Image (cartoon, helix red, strand yellow):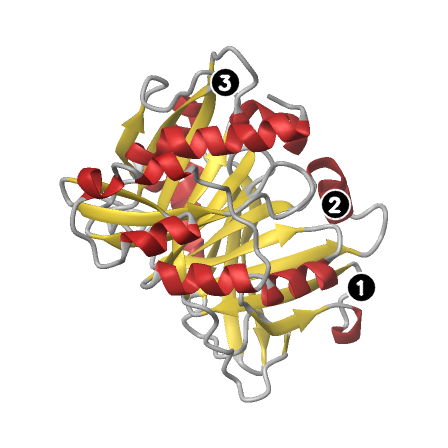
Amino acid sequence: MSSNDFMPIKNWDHLELWVGNAKQSAYYYEHALGFTQTAYAGPETGVRDRASYVMDQNDVRLVLTSGLRPDSEITRFACSHGDGVKDVALTVPSATEAYRQAVQRGARSVAEPHWLEDDYGRVELASIATYGENVHTFVNRDEYAGPYLPGYQSRVENGEPATGIGMLNIDHVVGNVELGRMEHWVEYYERVFGMVELIHFSDEAISTEYSALMSKVMMDGEGKIKFPINEPAEGKRKSQIEEYLDFYGGPGVQHVALATEDIVSTVEQLQDRGLHFLKTPGSYYEELEERVGEIDAEYEDLQRLGILADRDEEGYLLQIFTKTAQDRPTLFFEVIERHGSRGFGEGNFKALFEAIEREQALRGNL
């Protein structure tokens, strides 16, 4: 079933992160990751219970929100989970229709369809629940010309954010769920969104000496929206997924992949800004060129920067993973450059997981 039948999705709209200190997080996303603060809502704009900073880079929009009172659900979320993705919002032609289709297919309602208005026009919103405390908000902004949503003040002098450092759009958003729950959520995305399973990785494919996980990738009919879903598999030690679930306090978004057309330039700029990436051992590069073949980048640059490469029948991809973006070993980011490949770097899993396990061992959680 293609997603066009009943749930057309235009694009990613935004990711809203609920965080302990949005002002300081905004500084981090601006100075470490190259985002521009484009809009704000908080006490100065008449919002009493929260402060939200909208961060843009090309087609990537992050919203960082903190609660201002101890009894706020946002404050409680940040206390329970640490900084994390609360809302994976999707742009749709009609939020009412998307919500109606989702709820009648078994999705749990979080917010019924409603309109917000200001001088720039109006936006239609509705939300449904997914794994853990995560939600999907449907956003129809066809009749809106403002910076983000009604109630937000623009923070950009000339109306245009800076160009950033080459991160163009969201490639995929990965969820970690409990052991035995992956199939439940795969079936949910099939039923509620009409998504199809793009790839399935077994615990044999994704394992090291110590830990294993299973993963299925769900995709909409256009191939724009991709949701890999991971669950832990039985291993000798605590897997990275179990570590995440322990520290996050349940299921949630594990990482967000941001696409670039020049990963070498983007990663150089991120490193210059002080962002830390998982380390790739030198041995990884010994047979890389033989395995992956001709690419548009220099292998010396990949090794110098720690970038991974993989090839499948459709093409190749280059990817690298940041260390966690907050104190808990939970949310991190991926930078990815695709050349035809629709895969997820299966040939890199072992190297990647061993790098993650070295970090786990430092934390005493392996």
From the viewer's perspective, is 211 left or right of 302? right
At horizontal 20% and vertical 37% (from top left) the residue drawn is 291
At horizontal 53% and vertical 78% (from top left) the residue drawn is 146
Q: Which residue is mark 1?
A: 48
Can you say which quadrant of the picture contains the C terminus? Answer: top right
Q: First in sequence, mark 2 or 1: give its number.
A: 1
Q: First in sequence, mark 3 or 2: give its number.
A: 2
Q: Is residue 144 above or below residue 220?
A: below
Q: First in sequence, mark 3 or 1: give its number.
A: 1
Q: Is residue 193 above or below residue 146?
A: above
Question: Which residue is outermost to the bottom?
Answer: 158
From the viewer's side, name the closer residue of 34 and 79. 34
Q: Is residue 276 visible?
A: yes
Classify mark 3: residues with Cα within 10 Å, few (<14), some (14-19) or many (20+): some
x and y percentages locating residue 47 in the rendered image = 76, 67
x and y percentages locating residue 228 in the rendered image = 39, 37
Q: Which residue is mark 3?
A: 179
Please, what is the three-letter code of the amino acid marked with disc 2?
A: Glu
The answer to which image quadrant residue 286 occupies is top left
Measure the C-alpha gap from mark 2 to mark 1.
14 Å
Measure the C-alpha gap from mark 3 to mark 2.
27 Å
Q: Tell me the SS state at disc 3.
A: loop
Q: Which residue is mark 2?
A: 73
